Image (cartoon, rainbow, N blue to C red):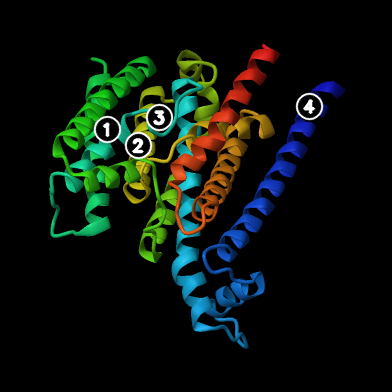
């Protein structure tokens, strides 16, 4: 009996400690991200700018510091944190729903579908409702992502209306390959090198265009997603034992899978529309979170969200500072970090199996 009580206590202590450490690291990383750039701002000035904007009296800041910190860097940092949290959250949910360790937010062909929309705008000049520039590309990407989602769900749905995980994965692969073929064909046949460069930059992800309106939309989207998935934590725990066991525990397997798959796909489409496709965050972070807190989703999902925010804020800070005078696509940074970590996770699982 003592051993049975000690193990949950150890996991609780480990979870609380991990959550505190990751949260502190996130706060420190946000401060660092607001300081660093082509113009470095002292940390005291950073928080004086934030305090003054929040109504703290008696703070005197320069117009340059205010513009750099509040108008340029802070919305980008908030957008990065929200995007990282959303991708990690969606990845954790999809890994549980499909019982597939390789599942990530782009499982349903979302990124390739978004690329179809973005390429149609950038190369073919398709327009939507008078939108221009970045907003037009984002709208095209969102519409393309939703179209890919609709096609995947149509192909994967069985006669009974269920969504078998295997069919979902296969349909996602098929639709993703079709979208990738379309994207490659359009870019190759266009002969426009500038358009090809813009498409490549979009597919590698960037947070450079995030301003306050976009940051607030991303934060609101992720907060809503978090509230929704936290309401399904017990159902997700039951899915770990299989569909039959989950059904015997009173979980509505079909409705839960439909709700969460559609919700995570829509959230991912919204994130991709603003930032492009940023890989490895939704794949690697949930696995790291499981190592720290175990498989229970009431702790796994919050820790995944905070960990995803931490990873993407760090990656974006590195992307805009590692090469002086030039910005590296943030997807390159996340891949450079995420791929070795994922290899280490595979090696660790293999050595303990």
Task: Verify CB contact (< 8 Å) between mark 3 and mark 2.
Answer: no
Q: Do we see residue 226 in this rendering?
A: no
- Element marked by disc 4: helix
- Where 26 falls versus 3 (above or below)? below
Judged left or right of residue 309, residue 190 is left
Q: Which residue is mark 1?
A: 149
Give me the C-alpha separation between circle 2 and circle 1. Answer: 7 Å
Task: Tell me the mark number nearer the camera, choosing from 3 and 4.
Answer: 4
- Element marked by disc 1: helix
Q: Residue at x 34, y 40 (%)?
A: 203
Give me the C-alpha separation between circle 3 and circle 4. Answer: 30 Å
- Residue 167: percent from left, percent from top: 32, 16
- Where 9 falls versus 138 (above or below)? above
Q: Nearer the viewer, residue 28 or 338?
A: 338
Label placed on residue 135: none
Q: Which residue is mark 4?
A: 7
Judged left or right of residue 282, residue 351 is right
Q: Which residue is mark 3?
A: 256
- Element marked by disc 3: helix
Task: Verify CB contact (< 8 Å) between mark 3 and mark 1.
Answer: no
Task: Verify CB contact (< 8 Å) between mark 2 and mark 1.
Answer: yes
Give me the C-alpha separation between circle 3 and circle 2. Answer: 14 Å
Q: Nearer the viewer, residue 74 or 213?
A: 74
Q: Residue at x 74, y 32 (%)?
A: 11
How many residues crowd around disc 3 within 10 Å: few (fewer than 14), some, or many (20 or more)?
A: some
Q: Which residue is mark 2?
A: 265
Q: Residue furthest top?
A: 353
Give me the C-alpha separation between circle 3 and circle 1. Answer: 17 Å
- Where 122 falls versus 61 (above or below)? above
Q: Residue at x 23, y 39 (%)?
A: 144
């Amino acid at each position: 009996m003592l051993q049975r009580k000690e193990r949950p206590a150890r996991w609780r202590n480990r979870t609380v400690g991990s959550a505190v450490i990751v949260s502190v690291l996130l706060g420190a990383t946000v401060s660092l991200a607001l300081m660093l750039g082509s113009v470095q701002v002292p940390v005291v000035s950073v928080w004086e700018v934030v305090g003054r904007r929040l109504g703290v009296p008696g703070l005197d800041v320069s117009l340059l510091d205010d513009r750099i910190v509040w108008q340029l860097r802070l919305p980008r940092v908030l957008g990065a944190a929200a995007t990282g949290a959303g991708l990690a959250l969606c990845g954790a949910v999809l890994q549980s729903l499909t019982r597939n360790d390789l599942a990530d937010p782009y499982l349903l062909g979302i990124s390739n579908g978004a690329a179809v929309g973005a390429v149609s705008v950038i190369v073919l000049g398709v327009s939507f409702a008078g939108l221009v520039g970045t907003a037009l590309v984002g709208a095209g990407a969102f519409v393309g992502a939703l179209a890919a989602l609709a096609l995947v769900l149509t192909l994967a749905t069985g006669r009974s209306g269920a969504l078998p995980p295997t069919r979902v994965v296969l349909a996602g692969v098929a639709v993703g390959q079709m979208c990738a073929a379309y994207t490659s064909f359009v870019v190759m046949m266009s002969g426009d090198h500038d358009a090809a460069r813009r498409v490549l930059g979009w597919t590698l992800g960037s947070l450079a265009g995030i301003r306050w309106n976009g940051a607030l939309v991303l934060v609101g989207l992720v907060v809503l997603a978090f509230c929704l998935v936290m309401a399904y934590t017990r159902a997700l725990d039951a899915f770990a034992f299989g569909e039959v066991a989950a059904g015997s525990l009173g979980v509505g397997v079909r409705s839960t899978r439909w709700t969460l798959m559609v919700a995570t796909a829509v959230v991912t489409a919204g994130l991709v529309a603003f930032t492009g496709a940023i890989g490895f965050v939704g794949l690697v972070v949930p696995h790291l979170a499981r190592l720290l807190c175990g498989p229970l989703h009431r702790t796994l999902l919050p820790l995944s969200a905070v960990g995803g925010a931490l990873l993407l804020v760090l990656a974006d800070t590195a992307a805009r500072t590692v090469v002086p005078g030039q910005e590296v696509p943030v997807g390159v940074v996340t891949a450079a970090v995420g791929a070795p970590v994922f290899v280490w996770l595979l090696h660790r699982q293999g050595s303990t199996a």
